Image (tube, rainbow, N blue to C red):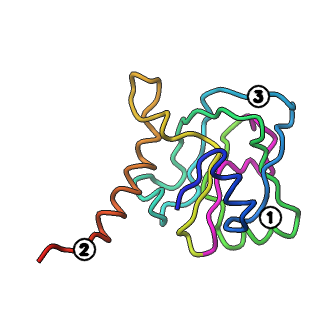
Amino acid sequence: MLGICNGFQILCEAGLLPGALRPNRTLTFVCLDAPLTVERTDLAFTARCEEGQRLTIPIKHGDGCYFADAELLKQLEANRQVVLRYDGENPNGSIAEIAGVANEWGNVMGLMPHPEHAVDPLLGASDGALILAGLVDAAREHMPVAA
């Protein structure tokens, strides 16, 4: 399951992902292409990426500041649940530059950036296609084989 932007908020509020999303540090809406670093590639969502790879994916939100208290942050880091981090400037004030997290089992992920808005170079970026294609690959692997 993938939650993007408000979907990420809903997954956190529903208890399917740890943490919470709060208003941006500046209390303003932020819309820009955000450089990200891939922290994990062993999930379906990032299987087409390389660890440490830099992606550019747009963000468009007013409540995108990811928050976890010190204890939860320590747990997230220990369990390798941080999947994506902002690289360079932290556009919304998220703790530890977190842009995306997964649950402990790696089958639910939330991220503030919009990969669906970065799938074609004509739109300015195509790095989002890597995340979406990883999901398509995983779905194909689990499709029943026709008899």
Among numbered discs 2 and 3, the one appearing first in the sequence: 3
Q: Secondary structure at mark 2?
A: loop
Give the residue at mark 1: 73
Of the residues shown, which amino acid type is indicated by label 2? Pro
Residue 144 is tagged as 2
Give the residue at mark 3: 29
Residue reaching furthest to the left: 147
Of the residues shown, which amino acid type is indicated by label 1? Leu
On whether residue 24 falls in the magenta region, the answer is: no
Query: On the rendered structure, is 131 left or right of 57?
Result: left
The answer to which of 33 and 117 lies nearer the viewer is 117
Q: Quadrant of the C terminus?
A: bottom left
Residue 94 is tagged as none
- Indicate which label's residue lies in the foreground, 3 or 1: 3
Query: On the rendered structure, is 141 left or right of 114?
Result: left
- Indicate which label's residue lies in the foreground, 2 or 1: 2
Residue range (magenta): 89-104
Q: Residue at x 71, y 51 (%)?
A: 98
